[in-house]
Image (cartoon, helix red, strand yellow):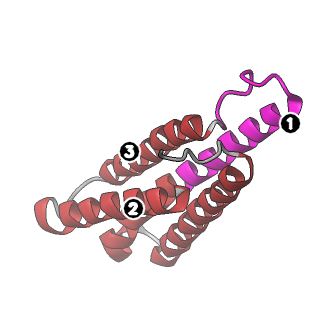
Amino acid sequence: MFAMLAFRIVAAIAAMQIFLVTVVWPDAHALLGLLLGAAAGAIIFGVGRAVLEQQGLRDPSAGGRPEQAEVARRAESLLLLASAGAFVSVAALFFVLRGPAAGAPWGFVAGLAAGLVATFVGSTRLNRLAADHGAPERSEG
């Protein structure tokens, strides 16, 4: 569930960025890419924290057991990794779209790939952590 949410958010903001940079504002400043990257990271972090709370993985003091606190800390760090990856990938996409005038384009392509990998690793490990330690499914009936 985390991976699907994270990549949908990154894809939506990347599509908005492509539209803004290619159609609306072709001579946009680098601040636009950084702001959209920060927005992607903040959205993933905010939505992720809400999902962690729903899964029972956010509050380390609720159960009082040390293993629950460790699981909550691990979940928060994985969420931070996924959010940072989203920031890097969306910010690097801006510089890839700007072309050679922005500097070394292959470095930004590598940054884009690294950001997507970080988002993938963080969100898929959150999926696994939620499946192993999350709240049990509620049955209707």
In the rendering, at what x and y percent does residue 107 appear? Answer: 54, 72
Give the magenta range: 57-85
Viewer-nearest residue: 34 or 69: 69
In the rendering, at what x and y percent does residue 71 appear? Answer: 77, 41
Give yes or no for residue 72 being in the magenta stretch. Answer: yes
Q: Earlier in the sequence, mark 3 or mark 1?
A: 3
State the CA–CA distance, disc 1 to disc 2.
Answer: 31 Å
Closer to the camera: disc 3 or disc 1? 1
Q: Residues within 10 Å of mark 1 (few under 14, many from 20)?
A: few
Which amino acid does the dot numbered 1 rest on? Glu
The residue beneath circle 3 is 39
Secondary element at image label 3: helix
Residue ID at (63%, 51%): 81
State the CA–CA distance, disc 2 to disc 3.
Answer: 14 Å
In the rendering, at what x and y percent does residue 99 appear? Answer: 34, 75
Q: Are marks 1 and 2 in contact (CB under 8 Å)?
A: no
Residue ID at (60%, 68%): 117
Give yes or no for residue 129 being in the magenta stretch. Answer: no
Q: Say whether residue 22 is left or right of residue 81.
A: left
Residue ID at (22%, 63%): 21
Disc number for residue 67 = 1
Residue ID at (55%, 63%): 115
Which amino acid does the dot numbered 3 rest on? Ala
Q: Earlier in the sequence, mark 1 or mark 2?
A: 2
Q: Tell me the quarter of the picture where residue 80 sits.
A: top right
In the rendering, at what x and y percent does residue 97 appear? Answer: 32, 71
